[in-house]
Image (spheres, coloured by chain):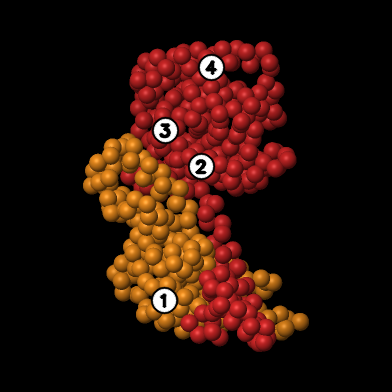
Chain colours: A red, B orange
Amino acid sequence: MQKHSDEALVAYLDGELDSAERGHVEAWLEADPAARDRLAGLAQSAELVRGAYADIVNEPLPERLIAAARGETVPASLPPQQAEILVLQRPGRVATPLRRRGWQIGLAAAAGLLGVICGSTGTYFGIGMLAPSGAAAERQLAAAAANDAWLNNAAAYYKLTVSAGDTMLIDVPASNDPREALQKISQSLPQQVRLPDLKPWGLTFRGARLVVVEGRPAAQLVYVTDNKAIGPLTLDIGATTQPDIPPTFNRRQDVNLLYWRHHGHAYALVGRTDIGYLWGIANDVAWQLDAI
Amino acid sequence: MSLRWKPAAAPASAAEHGSGASARFGDQMIAVLPRLRRFARGLAGSAAEADDLVQAACERALARAHQFEEGSRFDSWMFRIVQTIWIDQLRARDVRKEDGDVADERLGSDIPVRRIEARLALSEVRRAVELLPPDQRTTLMLVTVDGLSYKEAAQVAGVPVGTIMSRLARARVALQQQLDAGGGIRRRANIAEA
């Protein structure tokens, strides 16, 4: 490498020179204004290039790539992305009465026990009044099983989001006002996203990410907690053309999921907590968002 | 239609160590996907072509998982696979240019300026990157965008560190010329408008 060359300037900018080489370049820069201009131009163009590609790492991962990474194939007939996502119709926020909370935790415990009993089947259905019966139930389950690549992806999104720990990937951080984060994430979606309040469970809204659910853009709401028995958790909310299904438990990639579809919306509560907590929290979410 | 495992693509190491190893391998790949997509975008240009490239790289990595050396950097291995597939595609299309052979017909030429802006549009920067020869483009994406050291980039590209230095310098100078050309047009337009 010549001492006075573009190679030397670029390597100097990149911190790739040893102390002696750095000294040579600095002496050159000191003596030559043209070299200083050259260095400034090279630094500026490098910043432009970095900026031009910076946002790509924050884009939602296409389902087909997650499937490819797991050695799976994505059905070719996935519905195209359409602008009909997320119609959460109830305006305003619904408070969670304390009385209901006790019932809910009791139900969570009961559901957890039942989940253990049914664990070997790998699939858990919600309480009887929410579950369809007979042939209709079988059809719905068949439909659910027929296109469940998104569940793998929901689990992968969860792992990707939380794997970074304190620096977890968040497109829109909650900052001081969670509503502001929701407004920002909603700008990328056709409809306003509403935020379930999960503070009674010790869960704090950390922020939101844009992901893909059943081939459509969706919101992934990220909640964190100091309670390692529960969190962190993510709630994916997207649109779907698939038929309604009751809350259903599944386990993918060492991650637990409770998912359901209701009136054109797909929901997935994802975490490593047990089915009891998941069921209780899902009930709370459904009640607040009128999802069931 | 349910998901299915492709026996041909199942990594040998996964076959030897069970599905747990396969899942961990997949987890590593998913974790590096955002960076792979960015790298591929710089190489391929369009988002769709870049994702096709990454998907092909994932499939090849799974098929050759037994070739991955434990203890080496997984991300570097994946970058190398992406680069190899891209080069293969370029060769297949017979459009690969020799190293240093910048697309002179566009470098420094009068790129149409649709609007006068204070700063360069991101798309314009990406277009300037696309004009670089493949080897320079790869090096620029690995070092300047992804932040790999020269040594790491040399391992990915399979060339000496000195080659990385020279490719990178040529890439950065060509890029600056390209961007200066666009900026010059804008400055002249500003003056004319004033």
Residue identifier under label 2: A163
Q: Secondary structure at mark 4?
A: helix
Please, which chain is the residue tagged with disc 1 on?
B
Residue at the image position 31 percent from the left and 71 percent from the top: B91
Please, which chain is the residue tagged with disc 3 on?
A
Question: As rendered, which of A33 and B98 lies closer to the eye?
Answer: A33
Q: In 3D space, how far apart are the residues under numbered discs 2 and 1 (Cα atoms)?
A: 36 Å
Residue identifier under label 4: A108
Q: In 3D space, how far apart are the residues under numbered discs 4 and 3 (Cα atoms)?
A: 21 Å
Residue at the image position 56 percent from the left and 69 percent from the top: A15
Quarter in which the N terminus of chain B is drawn: top left
Residue at the image position 28 percent from the left and 54 percent from the top: B67
Residue B141 screen position, x and y as percent: 48, 66
Q: In 3D space, how far apart are the residues under numbered discs 3 and 2 (Cα atoms)?
A: 13 Å
Q: Secondary structure at mark 3?
A: loop
Q: Please indicate, yes or no, whether residue B49 appears anywhere in the rendered image.
A: yes
Evaluate whether label 3 is on the same chain as label 1.
Answer: no
Residue type pointed to by label 3: Asp
Q: Is residue B137 left or right of residue A237?
A: left
Determine crowd level at label 3: few under 14, some 14-19, many 20+ residues with C-alpha closer than 10 A.
Answer: few
Residue A191 lies, with reference to residue A257, above or below; the image says below
Residue type pointed to by label 4: Ala
Q: In 3D space, how far apart are the residues under numbered discs 1 and 4 (Cα atoms)?
A: 62 Å
Q: Which mark is residue B163?
A: 1
Residue type pointed to by label 2: Ser
